[in-house]
Every structure is written in C-alpha cells, then in structure tokens.
Image: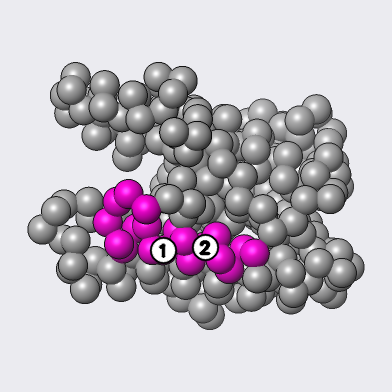
Amino acid sequence: MSAGEFAGKVALVTGGGSGIGRATAIAFARAGAKVVVDDINETTGSETVAEIVAAGGEAIFILADVTDEAAVAAMVARTVEAFGRLDCAYNNAGISGSPLPGDFWNTENFLKTFDVNAIGVFYCMKYEVAQMLKQGGGAIVNASSVAGMAGPGPPAYVGSKHAVTGMTRTVALAYATQGIRVNAVCPGAIRTPMVQRVMDSSDAVRATIENMHPMNRIGEPQEIADAVLFLCSAKSSFITGHPLAVEGGYLAR
C-alpha cells in the first residue's frame, strides 16, 4: 500500500502486540491510518503503539480480552471515542491450542481454543458491524488459516478456523448491500514468535514445516499484513465473503 492509502481512516487490530498483528498495525499506520492496537499483553501492545508513534503515526493501545463480550464492546466504543469512527478492523487475536496428540480429544483445550479463535471473532464482528452501520460502511478482515480451508490438524484449531471462515461468509452476505465488506485471510506457516520457537526445536522440524509449502519457505508477517490491507482497501471493493489463502501454494497440492 502506498503512503496515504488509508489517510483519514481508523483501523483496529486485535492481537496487535506481536507477529502478524504488530506487522499489520504498523502497515496501517504507514499507509496513513490512525490505529487502535488491542492485546491482552499490555507490554507488547504498548510497544507496537510506541513504534508507530516513533515513526510519526498516530495510535492508541487498548487492553481487552476478545473472549469478554463487555470488554469487546468497550474496545469498539473507546476506538470511536478516540478517533470518531471505525473504518477497518482486523480480528487477528487467536491461539494455536495444544497440538499434542494426547490433547486431540481434550475438551478443555477445545473449548478454550474456540473461545478465543471463534467466539472472540463473533464478539468483535458484532460490535464492529454495529458501528460501521452507523457511519455507512467499513471493511472487516478475520484471521482464519489454511486450517480453515483444509482438514489436517487437531479438531480444536482446525474447527475454530473453519468456524471463522464460515462466519466470515455469512456476515458478508448479511451486510453486502449495506457498505460493509467482510473477508478472511488464511495464512500458512508464518515467521511469528510462536512458529519460530517450533522451527528452532530441530533441523528436521524446520525442514518439515518449510517443505509443507511448495515455495519451500514459510511466510513473513509483512506478507499477511499486505493481504489484510488489500482486503481493507478500495482495490478490493468487489470482494466480500472471501477466504484469501496466503500460504505459498500449500493448498494447491
């Protein structure tokens, strides 16, 4: 996106304290948006805001847990109080859940993963859509995954990401004539702190993860940020209800 692409716009990024969320918040700011960074980690979220401000951008931090509906409602209200509107939202906050074989049928792990990844996205869209209706439109991007478009993986994570993809489509259909576009971004393995820790565990693990993608590498957070900004921009004005795969060819196999 060019500088000024989002001038006069307000963007909200949940889970903006690190990884893809941080890269996206910074990308919005570089493109001219006023940015609201949400995270449950006040230290990392505030660091994202500090980086934006140091570069001449405008941003605030909000401490909100997306699994708490009242906190989500307050987050959107605070966004409007601070900047007057909400034009773009990237509902990025999520967890991987436990990938351990012994937790495949772990009920606690399943419920916690759905609580953050799916119910959290539902709460965010509920209040984002309400605000966007008041002002005449907006764009929402939800964080799904290649796991939301395929089957491999544990039911907690895969199921929660399929839920995100499904909710994206149904909300997009519900508001398609009211100026609100809703899409999802579906990353493959991306160089976030969580993925990097797994890759650093052994050369064999690193090779396995890289070889999952026909490009023979994992993605970078900025590559997902670019996709999110595209889906929020006027360049995607005829795109809604779409899960955009950004995964180095993973799903082509």
Q: Label 2 is placed on what type of residue?
A: Val
Over which residues does the magenta segment extend? 151-169
Instruction: Say few, some or many: other residues with alpha carbon within 10 Å of mark 2 (under 14 / 14 to 19 / 20 or more).
Output: many
What percent of the width, then of the height, locates residue 232?
74, 48
The answer to whether residue 123 is above or below residue 89 is below
**Mark 2 vs 1: CB contact within 8 A:** yes
Give the CA separation, mark 2 to mark 1.
6 Å
What percent of the width, then of the height, locates residue 79?
69, 63
Please give left or right for residue 195 compared with residue 249 in the image.
left
Q: Label 1 is placed on what type of residue?
A: Ser
Query: Could you say which disc has been placed on residue 97 in the image?
Result: none
Residue in the picture at 45% in, 58% down: 161
101 or 40, which is in the foreground? Answer: 101
Provide the residue designation for mark 2: 164
Please give left or right for residue 195 compared with residue 84 in the image.
left
Seen as rendered, the residue at the extreme front is 253
The answer to whether residue 114 is above or below residue 245 is below
Residue in the picture at 58% in, 56% down: 142
Provide the residue designation for mark 1: 160
Label the magenta part by its dominant secondary structure.
helix
Residue in the picture at 43% in, 50% down: 150
For the N terminus, which image quadrant?
top right
Residue in the picture at 18% in, 68% down: 106
Asked if residue 50 can be seen in this view, the reply is no
